Amino acid sequence: MFFDTKDAEDFLKPEETWAASITGRYETNGKGWTTSASGAYRFNENWDALGNIVYRDYGDYKNGGGNTVAGTGFDVLSGLLKTTIRPSENSELKLGWVGSSDGWTETSRGVPANDVDLKSNTFTARYNIADDARSWLDLHINASYNKTVLDLTTLVPQNRFDPVTGLPVVLPAGSLSTFDVGTTGIDIWNTSRFETAGIAHELTYGGDWVGDDVETGGTAGGDSFYTPSGKRNVSGAYIQDKLTWEWLEVITGLRYDNYSLKDSEHETSGDRLSPRVTVGVSPFESAGLAGLQFYGTYAEGYRSPSLTETLISGNHPAGVTFPFLPNPNLKPETGKTVEFGVNYKQNDILEAGDALRLKAAYFNNNVEDYIDGVTLSAFDPTSGCPFGPGIPICFQYQNFAKAKINGFELESVYDAGWGYAGLSASIINGHTISYEGERADLASIPSSQVTAQLGLRFLEDKLTVGGEVQYNGKPKGNPVAKDYTLVNAFASYQATDNLKVDFRADNLFDVKYTNPLNGSSTAVIYEPGITLKLAATMRFGG
């Protein structure tokens, strides 16, 4: 709901009253164009505005095997408007709108099956007041409303099953499934800064609320079945204190979460207190080690079940039919995470003006009452799965005793005037443990990644060229994903103060690969093969 977008101040130079830019980009794979125009105006020192419009039109791309992946083309029209008003020297009000209209075609076995139209509008208001003379005041009030409407229209007749009776039906061409989601959110917090006995405090306290109102409908047997209508409310309150004393930094926090969700037949709710503590130590004062910090964190989190996980019911409408069972007794997930690591930053290491930044961390997340889908047998009298139309199984979202996710993350970069080099890594493993003690590797986690990047600067830093190599290791629990390595290259040339040209080549060796988070444990969706991208940006201002 709340995400940062650029302000007019980020776009305008200090001496400018107005500025505008136009960008055009072409991609060879899918033969797609992106055009973008941005503009900003400073009415006076206390009022400015920014606008942006983007249009993308892409065809179906080819994967690394040279085969066209049907249904991957799309067109998008999106825009942004944002204004900043400063009522006083110490306060600021930001009003914004972000909207988009997207369209694409879904395929089934390579044949166009559904026409999809998606419209989304988000309105935001942010207010902040702070005063150096009143260290107890740094108040933020954020409010937002998002409306998303998705219409899915069948292009060809489709053999389906009625979700109520389970009997075969034909979904005629032109049948409509509708998804209407409204989300309202508000977040209010204040930070008070003070000292006690030589210890500096940053005390932050506040609360938030998010409400979802989901309405779906359409022809029986349509895809709207998979998203039930209902309402969900999630709210919380929190307090956190950051204490700093010489080489020691301690952050302690406590958060209260509450949720409720309901439809016409079911209602469920829950709440929990979740603590957090972080300790950071910077024990060294020597020039070479002054930027070294060790830290450790223990934090608990809380995820309420979604409407679909809790309330979906009826007979599966596509392919084969079997019952979905609702689970209003589904428990929320509770995560307990331990993380420890090291941060290091240092300047002027090998030569004047260079810089090294490094962060390495290990984390272990234990999720109690983990939520995942399970298949039940109608032949098991203890499963609660009745014999019904179709095959003798049922599907239901249930809690597992635990899920364990652990891994290592590294971010490092060395930057000098002539260029830069970076190395990053994200190694993730995960598995579930049932209440009976059975262990199963998770399929729905990202690939482990190791990425090396090198960039060189020429022509008084106007030209930057470089490349990157990224190794991706498949999740152990995903039977269809494979390991793969991508090689990319890039170049950027600042021809003048107002003209910039960018070039990028992705997947240079045309590797055929799939992202395990796109698709499922049985279906494979291959990503784009070699793709060349050329863009130019022209800027004006005065």
Image (cartoon, helix red, strand yellow):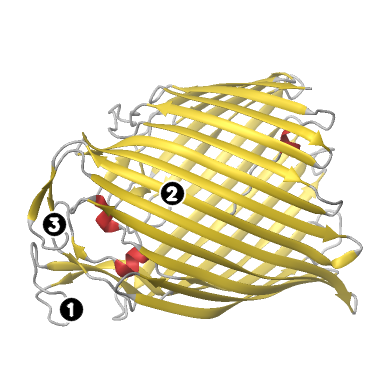
Q: Disc 2 marks which residue?
A: 148
Q: Name the residue under label 3.
A: 162
- Secondary structure under tag 1 reads loop
User: Nearest the camera: 181 or 287?
Assistant: 181
Q: What residue type is labelled 3?
A: Asp
Q: In the figure, is residue 506 to the left or right of 67?
A: right
Mark 2–mark 1 distance (CA, rounded to whole Å):
36 Å
Compared with residue 80, is residue 224 higher up or lower down, i.e. above or below? below
- Rendered image: mark on residue 384: 1
- Residue type of the residue flagged with mark 2: Thr
Q: Which of marks 2 and 3 is nearer the N terminus?
A: 2
Locate residue 118, reporting x and y percent. 39, 42
Q: Which of marks 3 and 1 is in front?
A: 3
Residue at (76, 43) in percent of width and height: 355
Picture quarter with the C terminus:
top right
- Crowding at dot 3, Cα within 10 Å, few <14 / some 14-19 / many 20+, comes out as many
- Amino acid beneath label 1: Gly
User: Residue 376 or 36: which is nearer the viewer?
Assistant: 36
Residue 34 placement (x, y as % from top left): 50, 26
- Tell me the mark number nearer the camera, choosing from 2 and 1: 2
